[in-house]
Structure formats: structure tokens, C-alpha cells
Image (cartoon, helix red, strand yellow):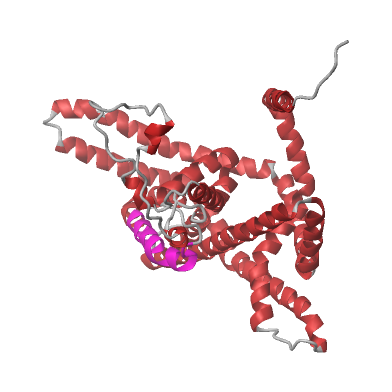
């Protein structure tokens, strides 16, 4: 009679095989039913939108509330007034935020709306001015090179002029499409404003009882997780909070400064549509790396159709402001909140933006910074286990150059690997952690 005997090796193989099959099946179902799954998650997100808004508002308001508690409402421990510190700090925080939003709506929004309405009502005259400018420019250039028939034929100036005129004329159609889009989704805007109002109420409750809520969540995690996993998760959340929070708050402050600086310089120079363009520049500046380009291109086009002679000076102004932001304002506010190189920032924005759109372009950098920090820590841990150096300079010349005409390309035994010397001098891991950026 057949007797079943346990075999740990084959049981492990079976578990992995089943896991691979289940993952593959799940991936296939997701791909084949992507639209249905996307609609499902969209519906879930709509239900939880007020709570998501509440979490975001509470997270952004928390630094200001903590500042008020530490610097303004410094009641003595044990005093009766101590129990009023948090409600007072939350109240003043939201009054300040409300005042900022009110000033923005009162001073900036009407100017932006007026600029947009002026752009829409006078678009025909602006297009005519821009077309005349292009015609004169192309005609002058054509007259200048008229004796060079081959060059004129190569550039095909008449087609170039026609294409530019069609591009300018088509901008009005884009404005009409945008207006129709706003009207079509007006009801959606009302729903989102309702969710935002509920989110503000949720954020107030979160701020009033944040310590107790966090403590309850930690108690639950401690109950269901091993101690080491629990500690690692808490430390990871704290590091993520430090990285993401510092980056987002700093970037918002930086973008507000850039927006007002653009408004000031444009008004001083007499450039058209200053409020509208300053808002575009300020909002898009939140996006790292690509933000200045995303905001500058449509803004330059708006300036061009309104006053072509100002376009060059506008581009020069944007370039100067972005240089000031990148070299002075940004580093002062953001500091080294991410510790990432320009290449890492570019890659993270491209990938995250491709998957999650505008939100991905904003959150991609801090998320990548956390991932890079975890990767670096894992790499250092593995290298120290192998008694290998962690200093980046060591790997600039590792391994030593070989003469492949005399030596093999592939090492085919452990003895051959042991023959490759490793520097016995290890670097200071702490110093490497502090100095290296990804």
C-alpha cells in the first residue's frame, strides 16, 4: 500500500509553483479586465474622497499647528489652560489657512478670470496681430535670402508661414474646447467641492485627536505583527513622513514665491496677462524638473499672441527666475530633503508621471527618495555581511583591469574569484551614508 511521506523540499517547490500560478492568473485577469477594474477602483476612490481630502489637509496643516503649539500656546504642564492648547492651535491654523485662501480668491482669482475673459474676447485681434508679426518676419527673412533660391526652397517659407498661421488660428478652438469641458464637468466640480468641505471637517477631527488615533493604529499593528517588523514599519513611516512632508511643504512654499515673483516682474515690465500667467507658472513649478517647461511653453504662447514683441523678454525673464529658483530659493527652502541627483529626479518623474499623471510627477520624487534610501541601506547591509567596502570610490576601479589576451573573461571557479583581491581597508559606513547621494 502506498504510504505518503512528507518531503520539505518538494513541499516548498509546490508552494512556490502554486504561488506563481496564482500571481500569473491574477495578472492575466487584471490585464483582460483592466477597464472594469479601473472603474471599480474609481468608484471606491469617489466614496473615500472626503477622507482622502481630510488626510491631505490634516497632513499639510500639521506643521503649522505644531509650530503654534510650541511657540504661541506654551502653557505650563499641569495648568488648566493646557487642555485648550490643541483646540486653540487647530482653530488658529484653519483661520490662517482660510485667510490665505480668501486673499488668494479675492485678489488673484478675479484677475485670472478677467485675463482669461480678455484673452477669449480679444482672441481675434490678438491672432491678427500675431499673424501680421509672423508675416512681416517671414517676408523680411524671405527678402533677405531671395538671392539664395536653393536655401529658400529648402526652408519652404510659404508653407512655414501657413503652418504658423494655422497654429495660431487653431488656438481659439482649443479655448472653446476648454470652455465646453468646464461646463460639461461643472456638476463634478460641485461634488468635489462638497467632498472638500467634508474633508476639512474630517481634518479638524484628525488634528484634534491625532496622537490617540496614531497610538490606536500602532497598538493594532503591534498586536498582529512581529516586534521587528512592527519597528521597521514605524521607522519607515517616520522616514517617509520626514522626506515626503519636507519636500511637499517646501515645494509649495517655493512655488508660491515663484508665482508672486513672476507676477511682480511681469507687472513691472508691462507684460500682458500677468495674473493668469503667474498662476500657471506657480502651479506648474510644484512639479520638479519638468515644471518650469510645462508652465513656460503655454505662457510664452499666450504672451506671443497678445504682444509678440514681448515674447523674447518673457522667455528671458522666466529663464532668470528659474535660475534664481534653482540656485538660490529652492536650495534654501528644500535643502537636501531628497538627496537625489538630477538623473534620479528625471527618471522618477518620468516613470511616476507615466503611471499616475500629474500626481505622480509631484509625489514621484519623494517616493523615489524613500525607495533609494531603502535600496542603499540594503546594499550596505549586504556588503558589510560580505566584508566588502561600501565607499563608492572603491568601485570606481573595482575589479582591476585584466589582460584578456592572456586571461579568461569569465571566472569559472571559486578559487579564481578568491584570487581577485579585495581591499582590506573598509570605509566608514556612517560617513558614506551621510555623503552619498543617489
Query: Given the current orientation, which residue lies at the most extreme right position?
Result: 1
Q: Is residue 379 left or right of residue 68?
A: left
| In front of the other: 409 or 124 | 409
Query: Given the current orientation, which residue lies at the most extreme left position?
Result: 147
- Rendered location of residue 173, percent (x, y): 52, 37
Q: Is residue 176 left or right of residue 94?
A: left
Q: Which residues are magenta?
A: 315-336
Q: Is residue 374 left or right of residue 33?
A: left
- Rendered location of residue 216, percent (x, y): 82, 61
**Residue pictured at 40% horizontal, 55% vertical:** 426
**Residue pictured at 70% horizontal, 26% vertical:** 9
Q: Is residue 258 left or right of residue 161?
A: right
**Residue pictured at 71% horizontal, 28% vertical:** 12
Residue 102, quarter of the rendered image: bottom right
Does the magenta-highlighted stretch encompass residue 287?
A: no
Does the magenta-highlighted stretch encompass residue 321?
A: yes
| In front of the other: 398 or 64 | 398
**Residue pictured at 52% horizontal, 64% vertical:** 256
The dominant secondary structure in magenta is: helix
- Rendered location of residue 217, percent (x, y): 79, 58
| In front of the other: 353 or 263 | 353
Amino acid at each position: 500500500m502506498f504510504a505518503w511521506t512528507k518531503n520539505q523540499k518538494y513541499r516548498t517547490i509546490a508552494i512556490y509553483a502554486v504561488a506563481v500560478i496564482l500571481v500569473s492568473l491574477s495578472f492575466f485577469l487584471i490585464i483582460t479586465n483592466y477597464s472594469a477594474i479601473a472603474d471599480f477602483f474609481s468608484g471606491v476612490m469617489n466614496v473615500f474622497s472626503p477622507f482622502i481630502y481630510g488626510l491631505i489637509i490634516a497632513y499639510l496643516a500639521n506643521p503649522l499647528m505644531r509650530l503654534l503649539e510650541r511657540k504661541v500656546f506654551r502653557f505650563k504642564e499641569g495648568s488648566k489652560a493646557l487642555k485648550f492648547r490643541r483646540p486653540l492651535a487647530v482653530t488658529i491654523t484653519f483661520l490662517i489657512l482660510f485667510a490665505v485662501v480668501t486673499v488668494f480668491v479675492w485678489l488673484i482669482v478675479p484677475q485670472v478670470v478677467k485675463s482669461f475673459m480678455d484673452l477669449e474676447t480679444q482672441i481675434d485681434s490678438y491672432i491678427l496681430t500675431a499673424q501680421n508679426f509672423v508675416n512681416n518676419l517671414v517676408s523680411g527673412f524671405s527678402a533677405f535670402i531671395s538671392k539664395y533660391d536653393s536655401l529658400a526652397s529648402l526652408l519652404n517659407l510659404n508653407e512655414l508661414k501657413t503652418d504658423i498661421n494655422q497654429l495660431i488660428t487653431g488656438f481659439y478652438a482649443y479655448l472653446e474646447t476648454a470652455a465646453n469641458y468646464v461646463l460639461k464637468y461643472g456638476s463634478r466640480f460641485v461634488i468635489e467641492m462638497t467632498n472638500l468641505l467634508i474633508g476639512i471637517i474630517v481634518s479638524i477631527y484628525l488634528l484634534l485627536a491625532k496622537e490617540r488615533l496614531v497610538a490606536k493604529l500602532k497598538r493594532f499593528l503591534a498586536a498582529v505583527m512581529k516586534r521587528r517588523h512592527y519597528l521597521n514599519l514605524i521607522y519607515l513611516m517616520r522616514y517617509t513622513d520626514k522626506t515626503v512632508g519636507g519636500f511637499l511643504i517646501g515645494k509649495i512654499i517655493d512655488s508660491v514665491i515663484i508665482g508672486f515673483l513672476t507676477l511682480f516682474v511681469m507687472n513691472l515690465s508691462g507684460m500682458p496677462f500677468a495674473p493668469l500667467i503667474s498662476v500657471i507658472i506657480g502651479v506648474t513649478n510644484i512639479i520638479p524638473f519638468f515644471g518650469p517647461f510645462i508652465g513656460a511653453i503655454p505662457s510664452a504662447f499666450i504672451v506671443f499672441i497678445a504682444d509678440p514683441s514681448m515674447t523674447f523678454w518673457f522667455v528671458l525673464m522666466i529663464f532668470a527666475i528659474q535660475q534664481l529658483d534653482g540656485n538660490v530659493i529652492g536650495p534654501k527652502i528644500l535643502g537636501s530633503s531628497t538627496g537625489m541627483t538630477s538623473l534620479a529626479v528625471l527618471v522618477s518623474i518620468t516613470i511616476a508621471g507615466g503611471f499616475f499623471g500629474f500626481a505622480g510627477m509631484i509625489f514621484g520624487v519623494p517616493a523615489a527618495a524613500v525607495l533609494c534610501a531603502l535600496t542603499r541601506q540594503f546594499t550596505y547591509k549586504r556588503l558589510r555581511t560580505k566584508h566588502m567596502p561600501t565607499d563608492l570610490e572603491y568601485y570606481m576601479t573595482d575589479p582591476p583591469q585584466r589582460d584578456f589576451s592572456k586571461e579568461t573573461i569569465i571566472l569559472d571557479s571559486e578559487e579564481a574569484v578568491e584570487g581577485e583581491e579585495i581591499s582590506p581597508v573598509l570605509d566608514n559606513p556612517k560617513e558614506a551614508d551621510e555623503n552619498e547621494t543617489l
